[in-house]
Amino acid sequence: MGSKLKLRRAVCEDADALTQLAKSAKASWGYPAEWLQAWEAQLSFSARYLREHDVFVAELSGKPVGVVAVDEADEPEIAHLWVSPRSQRQGVGRALMKHVEAFGREQGWTSIRIESDPHARPFYERLGAVYEGEVPAPVAGTARTLPLLRLSLAKRPARAR
């Protein structure tokens, strides 16, 4: 990445840009148009959502290239993690997750629950998340499950060199 990545809290004015980012990221995995349409509400950010949740944006040159949102209703959980297709595999998702881990530790969380898209499971596992099972997630009449993972926020021992 030529420019320096900047992480910041989302503001209400980000809603449309983050919605477009989420939709393009989901579409980049090749899902059928019917499924993407069924997920429209889930992929949308409103000003109200941004006010009521912990949402962080990754920016390059003043433009959002990634977003992560945490829902704390029952337990801390990643509600959204999207990286624009042009910025994938460049450390944006990793930077957002490291930011959420630090934020979670400040909040006193011990772990973060992740219902992952199947395509994203390897990414979360590379960050140390552990597979716990599957959750049903049917879409447009098609049976489907999502991997359930958990990321511990306990300090990991430093690696020996």
Image: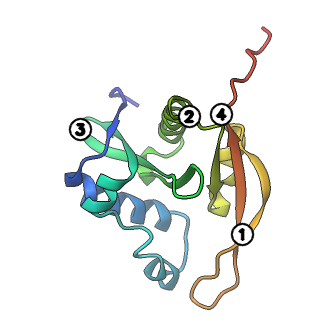
Reading the image, the residue beneath label 4 is 153
Mark 3–mark 2 Cα distance, whole angstroms, equals: 24 Å
Q: Which mark is residue 116?
A: none
Question: How many callouts does the rendering have?
Answer: 4
Check disc 2: other Cα within 10 Å, few if <14, some if 14-19, many if 20+. many
1 vs 4, front mark: 4
Q: Amino acid at mark 1?
A: Val
Mark 4 and mark 2 lie on one chain; the one further toward the N terminus is: 2
Mark 3–mark 1 Cα distance, whole angstroms, equals: 37 Å
Which residue lies at the image location 41% right of the left edge and 31% below the top edge?
Answer: 1
Classify 105 as above or below 17. above
Asked whether disc 4 touches disc 2, contact meaning CB atoms under 8 Å apart, the reply is: yes
Reading the image, the residue beneath label 1 is 135
Mark 1–mark 4 Cα distance, whole angstroms, equals: 22 Å
Most distant residue in the top direction: 161
Image coordinates of residue 32 in percent, x first then y, are: 53, 80
Q: Which mark is residue 101?
A: 2
Q: Amino acid at mark 4?
A: Leu
Q: Which quarter of the image is occupied by the C terminus?
A: top right
Q: Quadrant of residue 37?
A: bottom left
Nearer to me, 102 or 84: 102
Mark 3 and mark 2 lie on one chain; the one further toward the N terminus is: 3
Q: Secondary structure at mark 2?
A: helix
Mark 2–mark 1 Cα distance, whole angstroms, equals: 23 Å
